[in-house]
Image: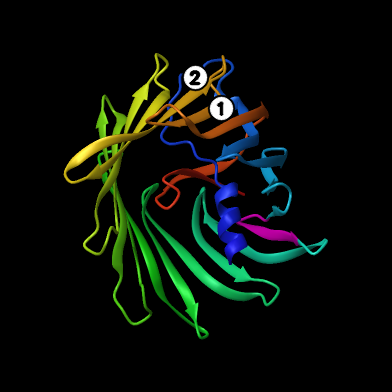
Amino acid sequence: MKHLITFAITLSVLTLFTTCKKDKESPDNYRLTKTVQTLFNEITETLLTYDNNRLRHVSSLNGIVESELIYQDDSITINYNFYEDNEWRQTAKTVHYYVGSLISKEIVYGMPSNIIHHIKNYEYEGSKIVSIKVWANNNDSLSLYDSTIYTYEFDNLVRVSFSYKAFPNEDLIENIKHEFTYQDNKLYEEFVYGDYHGYPIQLLTKKVYFYNDDERISLIKHYEFRDDTYSLSVEEEWQYDDIGNLISKIQTDNTGKIVVEEFLSYELGTYNYQSMYDIRLGGETKIPLP
């Protein structure tokens, strides 16, 4: 399932709680068509194509991984393909099921066997996601494998916790936790807890968010936490075009050296999606809607 995991990341479009002022031409009137990311001199280009307001195709990793989206009335099938030995092979597929405008269930199949790999169930209070539970196939029997819990104060997401089973017969163990604080109803700090030389999980890093005059994120400072001390490790600068589309994210280390560069391109058009925070990606993902 390595290719599925890799491509799930490319299919997700991270937005990280951005807010914007709406006018006649705003980012809501544009949709992402390309990202180019350079990580330690390795360049990855992702291309997205649409049919009307539906995402239809995504390709990445220099053209060797792609997904095709097939829409039904209350579901979307995503076929994941990998180019190897001069031919395309379908390595997995997922089927998303929806109730209204919210995803309710996701079934992941290994291909070409078409055997269920896992089932992901989404639970809500109103329109707020409160849990995601994954049931994995173990010797043709489904059992709870991991769980993500969302906690809110009023309308603000304040905590996301991810737990999983290291071994089938064990209880769920909390593996990752993110906690959020706000100032003036905007995200201010994000604290990341994880496994560091054993359990219980410990505070590992934090992010501090800064905004421009249009209340869009302009800078994220990443701090490592060791020996009860925060030390700045990375600064991440976000740039926008005149309309407000995010066009670049550049990370530099504490010496000023560029670590990651990402450039984004857009076209006029809309795209039906549901936003949701993904703790393992560390940001908000866009799930396509029928």
What SS does tag 2 mark?
loop
Q: Nearer the viewer, residue 69 or 80?
A: 80
Q: Is disc 2 surrounded by few (<14), some (14 to 19) or many (20+) residues within 10 Å?
A: few
- Name the residue type under label 1: Asp
Instruction: Please identify the quarter of the rendering in which residue 173 is found.
Output: bottom left
Instruction: Please identify the quarter of the rendering in which residue 214 is found.
Output: top left
Residue 232 location in percent, x, y? 31, 33
Residue name at image x 63 percent, y 32 percent: 31
Q: Which residues are magenta?
A: 71-83
Determine whether label 2 and label 1 are within 8 Å by CB: yes
Residue 163 location in percent, x, y? 33, 63
Q: Nearer the viewer, residue 162 or 64?
A: 64
Residue 277 visible in the picture: yes
| Quarter that holds the N terminus | bottom right
Circle on res. 28: 1
How many numbered marks appear?
Answer: 2
The correct choice, above or below, for 20 with respect to 47 in the image is above
Residue underneath mark 2: 22
- Name the residue type under label 2: Lys
Instruction: Please identify the quarter of the rendering in which residue 207 is found.
Output: top left
Asked if residue 123 lies in the magenta stretch, the reply is: no
Q: Residue furthest bottom?
A: 139
Q: Kindly report the secondary structure that dominates the magenta region of the rendered protein.
A: strand
Question: Disc 2 versus disc 1: distance between alpha carbons?
Answer: 8 Å
